[in-house]
Image: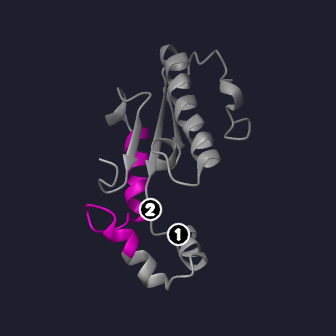
Amino acid sequence: MAGRGRHRNGRIPRSTAGCRPLCIRRTGPVSGVIGNIGQTNYCAAKGGVVLLTKALAVDHSAQGIRVNCVCPGDVDTPMLTAEAGASGLNIADYMEEAADAVPSGRIAEPDEVASLALFLASDAATHINGATILIDGGANA
């Protein structure tokens, strides 16, 4: 966990006097909340990101610091395309299978994840703290 961000080991400066409220948004995949076959180590590490988020939220809420975690499912990015290529399947077939596994019938677009992150950083989300929000089209509902 030591390499996951600037506030390593939960060290955030204790004095935030005179600063505007701070929002820390972490990203951890759905695998941090839901186990996957053959991914024990990965799920454990990502689960640590989720719990670190919650602990930081509790520790620093009185300082006006909010900490939330966004956990996207499959997102149409170069990383997913590379995963599709490595699977041995035709990329189009892989993407179709991924979309079929989601109740919404599609995988997420990067701007959908970005919009959630921007909302969490906005003044409209000032009472959201310590949350882990899955953005996966209902795949883990």
Where's residue 46, x and y in %? 58, 43
Q: Is residue 38 left or right of residue 92?
A: right
**Upstream in the sequence, badge 1 or badge 2?**
2
Q: Which mark is residue 99?
A: none
The image quadrant of residue 109 is bottom left
Depicted 3 relative to depicted 78: above or below = above
> Which range of residues does the magenta coloring cover?
97-121
Q: Which residue is mark 2?
A: 74
Q: Secondary structure at mark 2?
A: loop
The image quadrant of residue 131 is top left
Circle 1/circle 2 CB separation < 8 Å:
yes
Where's residue 16, x and y in %? 59, 19
Q: Amino acid at mark 1?
A: Leu
Q: Which residue is mark 1?
A: 80
Where's residue 79, x and y in %? 57, 68
Q: Is residue 12 left or right of residue 138?
A: right
Q: Secondary structure at mark 1?
A: helix
* Mark 1–mark 2 distance (CA, rounded to whole Å): 7 Å
